[in-house]
Image (spheres, rainbow, N blue to C red):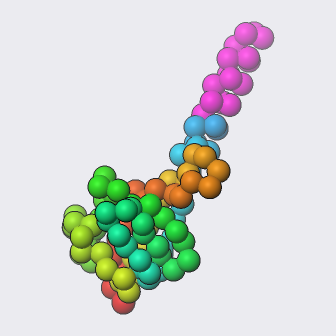
Amino acid sequence: MRKSMVWTAAALALVMAGSALAEALRGGGRIGEVNLATGVFRVDTAQLRIEARTRVFDYGGKPASASVLEPGMSVSYTALPGTKPGEVPLVQEVRMVPN
């Protein structure tokens, strides 16, 4: 009986740790800066990082190229927090929002 309790506690701790690490950041606002060459992506005051694997969706929810993103556009985003202190969050998904 004790062994099963230990295994259950260990499994629960693993699940909780995994879900905390995978917690996504969500936000939105107006694009202040986007530079695909350097990966710089700023939405309002949030400094983010964008990569080729970042999914971009147009106003209708259809996939689009990141090259269509321009300063002043309204967007919502989902990003993964950095794994090291001071690391900029990596954007996973950007959705254009009509003004």
Residue 83 location in percent, x, y?
Answer: 57, 46
Residue 15 location in percent, x, y?
Answer: 60, 34
Residue 74 location in percent, x, y?
Answer: 39, 82
Please say whether residue 18 is visible from this viewpoint: yes
Q: Total of numbered circles in the picture?
A: 0
Residue nearer the viewer, 19 or 70: 70
Q: Is residue 30 above or below residue 41?
A: below
Residue nearer the viewer, 84 or 4: 84
Does 32 sit left or right of 12 as displayed?
A: left
Residue nearer the viewer, 14 or 64: 64
Residue at 31 percent across and 59 percent down: it is 55
Residue nearer the viewer, 5 or 54: 54
Which stretch is magenta?
1-15
Predominant secondary structure, magenta span: helix
State the image quarter where residue 63 is shown. Answer: bottom left
State the image quarter where residue 64 is shown. Answer: bottom left
Q: Is residue 49 above or below residue 28?
A: above
Instruction: Indicate yes or no whether the magenta region holds residue 26.
Output: no
